[in-house]
Amino acid sequence: MPQPKPLYRPIRARGRITVKDGMNSLERRYAQHLHSRRLAGEIHGFSFERHNLKPADRTYYRPDFEVMLPDGTIEFHEVKGFMRDDANVKIKVAAQQFPQYVFRLVRWDRKTGWKITTYPPHGK
């Protein structure tokens, strides 16, 4: 007699492992960096994954951090330990579609500390 099919199928997890507040360890470290910048008066404030932008049809982009500068300028900071092609395209397209904001890609370098790339690069 044939075996009946199981009622469930094993599910494999996708994406990154997060903790209760939704931040991974690199994002948490960058949040501490932003907090120290806020205490120093360099920024007015910041929030984590507050906005969901729509740079194109059926494409959404949720920047890791919204950062407000003392002059009221809004910046979106994306913290990456590793950059996939789709994430790179999303941040570039978002920077083109929302020119009123500054987009920054933030990476951690063990030798030099935080490495920040601005999109689009100034002067282009």
Image (cartoon, grey):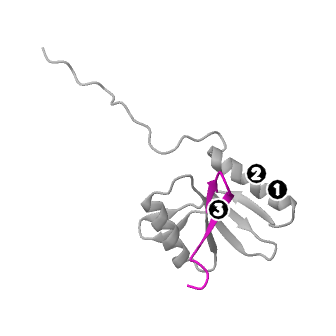
Q: Nearer the viewer, mark 3 or mark 1?
A: 3
Residue found 58% across the figure and 78% down from its top:
121
Q: Are marks 1 and 2 in contact (CB under 8 Å)?
A: yes
Q: Is residue 24 left or right of residue 96?
A: right
Disc marking residue 115 = 3
Quadrant (top left, top right, bottom left, bottom right) of the C terminus: bottom right
The 10 Å Cα crowd at callout 3, few under 14, some 14 to 19, many 20 or more, is few
The residue at the far front in this view is: 111
Name the amino acid type tagged 1.
Answer: Ser
Q: Which residue is mark 1?
A: 36
Residue 57 x/y as whole percent:
42, 70
Q: Is residue 93 left or right of residue 67?
A: left
The residue at the far bottom in this view is: 123
Q: Are marks 3 and 1 in contact (CB under 8 Å)?
A: no
Viewer-nearest residue: 90 or 88:
88
Q: Which residue is mark 2?
A: 32
The 10 Å Cα crowd at callout 2, few under 14, some 14 to 19, many 20 or more, is few
Count of marks overlaid on the render:
3
Name the amino acid type tagged 3.
Answer: Lys
Q: Quarter of the image holding residue 120?
A: bottom right
Residue 56 x/y as whole percent:
44, 71
Under circle 2, the secondary element is helix
Residue found 72% across the figure and 53% down from its top:
31
Q: Is residue 44 above or below residue 113?
A: below
The residue at the far right in this view is: 40
The 10 Å Cα crowd at callout 1, few under 14, some 14 to 19, many 20 or more, is few
Label 1 to label 2, Cα distance in Å?
Answer: 6 Å
Name the amino acid type tagged 2.
Answer: Gln
Label 3 to label 1, Cα distance in Å?
Answer: 17 Å
Give the residues drawn in magenta, as a range: 106-124
Viewer-nearest residue: 107 or 59:
107
